Amino acid sequence: MSKAVNNINMGIVEPQERIKNLSHCGTVIEVDKNMAVSRYYRSGTEMLRMANVYLNEGNHENAFILYMRYMTLFIEKIRQHPDFESVKPQVKAINKTIKAEIMPTTEKLRNKLLLQYKREYEQFLANKEAERLQEQREEANRAKRAAAAAASGGVPSLIPANLHVQIDANNQPTAPDLGLLDQVVYPNDFPTGTNRSNLPSSGLLLPAVDTTGADRSSNASSKPAFDRNQKPQYNRTDSLLAGSLRTVNVPADTMNVFLQLAHANTSKSIETCGVLAGHLARNELYITHIIAPQQHGTPDSCNTMHEEQIFDVQDQMQLITLGWIHTHPTQTAFLSSVDLHTHCSYQMMMPEAIAIVCAPKYNTTGFFILTPHYGLDYIAQCRQSGFHPHPNDPPLFMDAQHIKMDSQAKIKVIDLRR
């Protein structure tokens, strides 16, 4: 539904331009006329849910982007869907909420962000000015040293210009201890290797130093008080502007729990499926529940029924859809042509949505997504149904790289089949 746009490193620093860029990111949303319009209605509900989380966590940029997408979806884009009339009453109610709540909240966020961007811009300019002054001082010092060298006949002084020696009149130098001369080590007497044990312990010879781990950068000049590379502080990986997939945390026991739930069907070589749901926190997604809907399974497919029951549960528990899980009782872990189309509807609504495939016969599990730059668009445009061939090159799906197994979390099951 929304295209990932990587705008975070565009180098935009002027406050008004940053707001403009943020607003543009919030309007990058598309409606596929072949996708059920009810999917967009559900996606909008979960989008608003995530926006509220970002707002409560103080991530104002992400909250602003999602509020903008929510308004763009229901005020403008949803009207382009051929089945818009079927959800028109719901959209009318949503637009009242947008006018009464979402618009004022978004405008407050815009003002807060503009103030934040102005402060960061002022700091950015101050850093640039500090850099200019530092370079100016360094150039003046170089010129001064060059002039001093020219005045002394072109031979630069070996004594640092900033070295000042203060002589204490009450502390007159004394003659050296002649006995120390006998302990001086001359070049021809200097030991080689590690044979230093026979040297007098006069303190005139530095102790052996292990240079293998020594810091050889001790003579490096210290850094100035400012960072020459400092940019405004909006280059953060927790921003939706980055365009990257957020991490999906999966409880490590998810697969075993689901296989136990599916055992009766698996023993009869019938597939079982479930919805993966959870919540957003600190810009990461956490799967917390498997919702097993009423369903009809066959040896190579599984169709959900009465999806409104799933939505009711999610609304009651404030859960968002993060993908789905199903078994392949007699096959390996992969996405069939039917699975590709099933997952397409999940990934179009939530780019991070994953498909978990459990293959108990082969004791394997796959974590898949459609390839974002090819497979997702290809399957979305495919009008065939049932099992049908797809090209394998370029690949249509891939292993999910944005998941993280959580050994501490425990999955919960809501079984609606009972």
Image: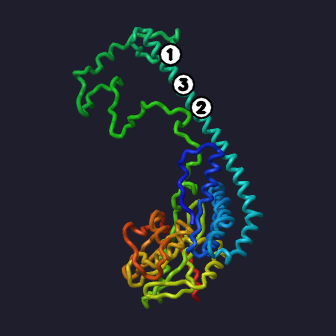
In the figure, 168 relative to 417: above or below? above
In the figure, 200 relative to 364: above or below? above
Which mark's residue is nearer the viewer, 1 or 2?
Answer: 2
Disc 2 target residue:
129
- State how far apart marks 2 and 3 are (Cα): 10 Å
Verify CB contact (< 8 Å) between mark 1 and mark 3.
Answer: no
Disc 1 target residue:
164
Q: Earlier in the sequence, mark 1 or mark 3?
A: 3
Which residue is nearer to you in this view: 390 or 61? 390
The quarter in which the C terminus is drawn is bottom right
Q: What SS does tag 3 mark?
A: helix
Q: Residue at x 38, y 66 (%)?
A: 394
Q: Quadrant of residue 284?
A: bottom right
- State how far apart marks 1 and 2 are (Cα): 31 Å
Which residue is nearer to you in this view: 162 or 128? 128
Disc 3 target residue:
136
Q: Residue at x 75, y 58 (%)?
A: 104
Task: Say whether residue 319 is visible.
Answer: no
Verify CB contact (< 8 Å) between mark 2 and mark 3.
Answer: no
Q: Residue at x 49, y 84 (%)?
A: 302
Q: What SS does tag 1 mark?
A: loop
In the figure, 251 relative to 14: above or below? below
Q: Position of residue 156 (x, y in %)?
A: 41, 14
Q: Position of residue 68 (x, y in %)?
A: 66, 60
Question: In the orientation shown, which residue stands out farthest toward the bottom?
Answer: 268
Q: What SS does tag 2 mark?
A: helix
Q: Quadrant of residue 94?
A: bottom right
